[in-house]
Amino acid sequence: MSSNLEDAISVAVGIARDHGVAVEKPIALRSTNNTVAWLYPAPIVAKIGTGRFSRLATELKVAQELAALGAPVVHPAREMPPSVHFRDGLGVTFWRYHAQSSPVQIPAGRIAAALRQLHAAMAKLSSAVREHLPTYMQHLNSARSRLADPDDLQALSAPDRRLLAATFDRLQVEMIASGAPENIRVLHGEPHSGNILVVGGDLAFIDFETVCTGPVEWDLAHIDELGYGLPVNPRLLWACQGMVSAKTATLCWADVERGDFREHAEWHLSNLKTNIAPQLFHANSDSKRLSSDDESILKDE
């Protein structure tokens, strides 16, 4: 482990031990936006807010209410006070540990059905929680702003930066044009398979830092929607699927030397070039002619 990772985990171990939790050997589980570690042998996972935009307090409040509603979520750890614990400039939350078989192949229909159940519970969240949630567009605008910073994403080539920025902007127009205000609801934000655990044979969602409000198509864009059981807007879903790749590519290029981020960055950028940009910039519509800027972007490819 890197010294920064070890230091973050040591902070979590110290807090847990102060509350009487016996920790013999912490085991790092992942280090992406935050650092997550199993406090072995205790059935507790520590989540340490080492990321750029940590929202641990919101995540904890959402998860507590969803757990009380019987939603398919991983619960906060009973052994620790249910709050964000601060030490040495870091925030830490504690969650139930559930051992996972690796690799886990979850049928798409099961994920979609579990997501529909999660959405039903999210519709019952208190107004005190709901009123402080960002919109999904706020999350997207935050990612888009990184492309405008010349000192950020330095591993990304200039043509690819232009492509990502133009794709963001065009997809955002598509999403706004094809979405309906009455369809806005509370969403997980990133309900992909990496944020799902198998608990007692059932599926349970984790990582509610990305919770937001928006159209259901935004959540469905992260999974195969087969089995969700409710009608969706196909045009909006396509635009959201493209935006998932644009957002993921941007955030992964911003931290491309970390873990497997380069693999994800390259895959999503390739997906945009192959499957999204050709349709997006060559839209066959009388009201949308290919601009000189768009032609220049596509020539870069």
Image (cartoon, grey):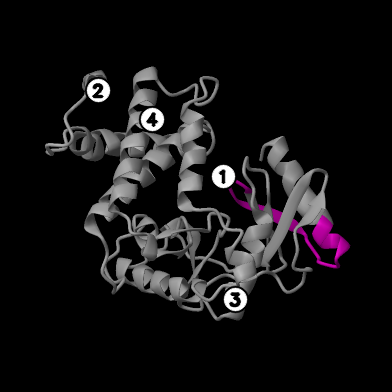
What element does badge 1 sit on? loop
Give the class, few, some or many, for how many residues have Cα within 10 Å of label 3's Cα (few <14, many ≥20): some
- The circle on residue 301 is 2
Per the rendering, the mark at residue 165 is: 4
Work out which quarter of the rendered image holds the N terminus and state it.
Answer: top right
Q: CA distance from mark 2 to mark 1?
A: 30 Å
Q: Position of residue 122 (x, y in %)?
A: 50, 71
10 or 149, nearer to the observer = 149
Residue 107 image position (x, y, % from top left): 32, 68
* Secondary element type, mark 2: loop
Judge left or right: residue 54 versus residue 107.
Answer: right
Where residue 35 appears, as percent x and y from the top left, is 64, 48
- Residue under label 3: 67
Q: Which amino acid, mark 3?
A: Ala
Closer to viewer: mark 3 or mark 1: 3
Q: Are marks 2 and 1 in contact (CB under 8 Å)?
A: no
* Magenta highlight on residue 145: no
What's the residue type where badge 1 is placed? Thr
Between the C-alphas of marks 2 and 4, the distance is 14 Å
Q: In the image, which disc is placed on residue 32?
A: 1
Distance of mark 2 from mark 3, alpha carbons? Answer: 47 Å
Check residue 33 for magenta coloring: yes
Please identify, in this view, whether the residue under mark 2 or under mark 4 is nearer the observer. Answer: 4
**Pointer 3 with pointer 1, Cβ within 8 A:** no
Name which residue lies at 72% across and 36% down. 3
Q: Earlier in the sequence, mark 4 or mark 3?
A: 3
Of residues 277 and 15, the one nearer the viewer is 277
Q: Which residues are magenta?
A: 15-34
Q: Residue at x 75, y 58 (%)?
A: 84
